[in-house]
Image (cartoon, rainbow, N blue to C red):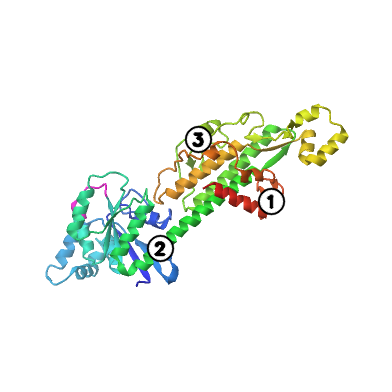
Amino acid sequence: MLSELNLAIVGHANVGKTSLLRTLTQDSQFGTISNKPGTTRHVEAITFSLAEQKKIIFYDTPGLEDSIALYDYINDLSRDNAKLDGVDKLNLFLASPEAEHQFEQEAKVIRQLLKSDAALYVIDVREPILDKYHDELAILADGDKPILALFNYTSSSSPYEADWKMLLARIGIHAIVRFDAIFPSIEGEYRLYQSLSLLIEPAKNILALWQERIVQQRIERDQRAKLIIAEALVDVTAYNETVKDNMPQMVKLMQDKVRGREQQAINELLSLYHFSIQQESSENISLTEGRFDSDLFNKEALKLIGIHLGKGVFSGAAIGAGVDLAVGGITLGSAALIGATIGGLTQTAKHYGSRIMQKLSGYNKMTIDDTIICFLSLRLLQLKTNLNLRGHANALPIILTKLDEATWKKGKLPKPLQIARAHPNWSSLNSQKNKKQDQQRQEVLENVANELE
């Protein structure tokens, strides 16, 4: 059995070889992607160490740009020796001067093919079959390596798929898998590695370990993403400010702090999924350069996502500012009006604590409204869902769609978050020392994360 599997990603220029590797390795920064031909000029390797001291190494190779001329050149070189097999012909070419000059890029591909255990031949299935594809397939087949043909960009319907299958069969390549590097599916990825396992029998163990790694990564990443969101929600829910004068200034301060905390969560999610923070979008609730361009406190944005607006959420001190004025069914304003004495105030303070005393002294303790917190949760949940399904070669905008998350759309916090209201020391947004290691806080975080299922 192999201890190291070397896979060469080969094909014509601009068929999506680097895009495929970005998706398979979950690395949006690997290589360079461009519509210009010949973007990849050198062989680039990415190595993954697996359990049992196994390795899998992917090689991104340059595009085969001039296969027609190369095919003729190789045949001319071997014309006087009919006994040469395919590998002999390729080695003869690699030893020739033109392997360092006219066909330098093609020589890099062939060298890597001969050193690899197998090749993934990437096909842009949207392209019609041209003579150059006939010739490059014939050249690759001479390498005597197992070749798995991968139909890329299958999310777009193509009239050429049957023609490609016929051409591959004539060359002797019958192992084909459909896998879209931009819009990948878990099932497509599973079929890809299953096909490789059948094609390269000695690599079964390595490919099984690689698949186990991918599945475990998905589970761990999803759990970490939920904790990132839960941490942000607890921070915002537990956050409060005490204000007596200059209410508008405090409103702006609180809004800015919450926006900043949302941005922190967005950045953490993008980093967790290995996506660039510079992803762009132009939708109503969209991600532009790493942040939502539709404001968290925007009334129209709330309507777009289907959240029910609470009374007074956008009036007065609102900010999504819930100022809890009710105690025992009597508003604090009413308590003051019915003539509380100094002695009465003392008893009130003993019973209800500093919050009532602050109110009776003209102070308000302001918190973020439940509706805003529910809106924040939906935005982050939508981003998580999008990133879970997104291919790392996808340069299209991150578009957030409506979710059917009934509990969060009601504008009412689930019980675990309601507990956080009473613990301002749990929030990193508060000025007092934050007790992030509090055991109860950790339990609430885990419970909130579970609610995000």
Horizontal relation, residue 92 to residue 56: left or right: left
Magenta stretch secondary structure, dominant: loop
Up-down relation of residue 130 to residue 203 (above or below): above
Residue beneath the point at 44% across and 68% down? 51
* Residue 206: quarter of image: bottom left
Instruction: Examine the structure image and report whether residue 301 is included in the region drawn in magenta.
Output: no
Tell me the kind of residue under disc 1.
Answer: Asn
Per the image, label 3 sits on a secondary structure element best described as helix
Up-down relation of residue 39 to residue 253 (above or below): below
- Per the image, the residue denoted by label 2 is 210
Q: Which mark is residue 305?
A: 3
Q: CA distance from mark 2 to mark 1?
A: 41 Å
Give the quarter of the figure containing the N terminus.
Answer: bottom left
| Within-10-Å neighbours for mark 3: few <14, some 14–19, many 20+ | some
Tell me the kind of residue under disc 3.
Answer: Ile
- Per the image, the residue denoted by label 1 is 434
State which region is magenta.
Answer: 125-133
